[in-house]
């Protein structure tokens, strides 16, 4: 699956997109493994999905820093 609007976003956003696609895949594998009763495999896939999401967050934060913007969670309000 390709996430729309990811083209032309620079290398950091391209990396974030790639990581999110990997997280989607790993989350689906974890879901399927739970349904099959393969809990150990489900756990491994869930942890891998979480790591991919963390990597995507880091890439988006770096892209925001390049533009001089702050991530939404870091804003005072």
Image (spheres, helix red, strand yellow):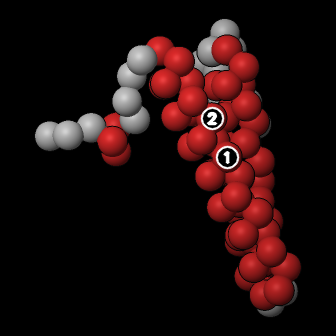
Q: Secondary structure at mark 2?
A: helix
**Classed neighbour count for the residue bearing mark 1: other residues with Cα under 10 Å, few (<14), some (14–19), many (≥20):** some
Residue at 47% across, 15% down: 67
Circle 2 is placed at which residue position? Answer: 59
62 lies above or below 34: above
Q: Quadrant of residue 36?
A: bottom right
* Circle 1/circle 2 CB separation < 8 Å: yes
User: Residue 46 or 56: which is nearer the viewer?
Assistant: 56
Query: Which x, y percent locates residue 70?
Result: 37, 30
Residue at 63% across, 35% down: 59
User: Residue 72 or 27: which is nearer the viewer?
Assistant: 72
Mark pair 1, 2: CA separation: 6 Å
Query: Which x, y percent locates residue 41?
Result: 85, 79
Q: Quadrant of residue 74?
A: top left
Query: Which x, y percent locates residue 40?
Result: 83, 86
Residue at 72% across, 19% down: 11
């Amino acid at each position: 699956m390709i996430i729309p609007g990811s083209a032309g976003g620079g290398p950091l956003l391209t990396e974030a997109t790639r990581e999110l696609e990997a997280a989607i895949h790993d989350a689906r594998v974890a879901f399927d493994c739970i349904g099959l009763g393969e809990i150990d495999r489900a756990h491994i896939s869930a942890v891998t999905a979480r790591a991919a999401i963390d990597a995507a967050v880091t890439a988006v934060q770096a892209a925001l820093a390049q533009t001089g913007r702050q991530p939404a969670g870091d804003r005072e309000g």
